[in-house]
């Protein structure tokens, strides 16, 4: 149970950090208010979307994922970020391309933070 709570909190923080970095780098991604609470709420909602909805979308799009050798997962990540933008009005993403790039930034941040935080097996 502790590990699951830790993973949820870690994903929440990673998503929030990734969204903040994406909003800083990409001009077509912005928050209505540059407050920490808005960024944290966005990260939490994205963590919940990724935990509940993303597995279903991945299973349904499995043929496309296999045919593209996994590259379609980038589109799925963009869909999740786009869904976040629709559900949480404080996050503004102007286009689907910006949502895909935001998904890539979050994925990169996720990879880097997980490599640093994850315990190493010896």
Image (cartoon, grey):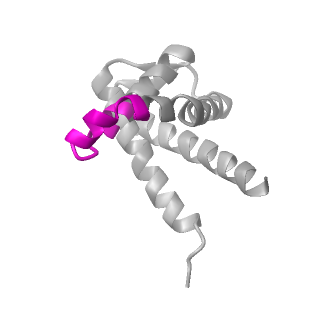
Residue 67 magenta:
yes
Is any part of residue 17 visible from this angle? yes
Q: Residue at x 34, y 30 (%)?
A: 61
Return the residue found at the far right. 1
Q: Residue at x 23, y 47 (%)?
A: 69
117 vs 13: above or below: below
Q: Residue at x 47, y 20 (%)?
A: 83
Residue 57 lies, in percent from the top left, at 43, 29
Q: Classify the position of the C terminus by image quarter.
A: bottom right
Where residue 97 sits, quadrant-wise, is: top left
Compared across the picture, whether 116 is left or right of 29 comes to right
Where residue 2 sits, quadrant-wise, is: bottom right
Q: Residue at x 59, y 31 (%)?
A: 52
Q: For the magenta stretch, what is the residue range?
A: 58-76
Q: Nearer the viewer, residue 30 or 58?
A: 58
Dominant secondary structure of the residues highlighted in magenta in the image: helix
Where residue 47 sits, quadrant-wise, is: top right
Residue 65 magenta:
yes
Compared across the picture, whether 84 is left or right of 7 comes to left
Residue 26 lies, in percent from the top left, at 35, 33
Compared across the picture, whether 88 is left or right of 100 comes to right
Q: Nearer the viewer, residue 75 or 113?
A: 75
Q: Nearer the viewer, residue 90 or 24?
A: 90
Residue 106 lies, in percent from the top left, at 44, 43
Is any part of residue 27 visible from this angle? no
């Amino acid at each position: 149970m502790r590990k699951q709570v830790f993973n949820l909190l870690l994903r929440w923080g990673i998503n929030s950090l990734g969204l903040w970095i994406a909003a800083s780098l990409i001009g077509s991604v912005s928050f209505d208010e540059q407050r920490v609470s808005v960024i944290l709420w966005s990260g939490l909602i994205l963590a919940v979307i990724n935990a509940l909805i993303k597995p279903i979308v991945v299973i349904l799009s499995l043929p496309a994922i296999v045919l593209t050798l996994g590259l379609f997962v980038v589109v799925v990540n963009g869909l999740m970020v786009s869904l976040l933008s629709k559900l949480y009005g404080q996050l503004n993403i102007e286009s689907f391309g910006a949502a895909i790039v935001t998904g890539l930034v979050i994925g990169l941040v996720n990879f880097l933070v997980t490599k640093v935080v994850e315990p190493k097996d010896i």
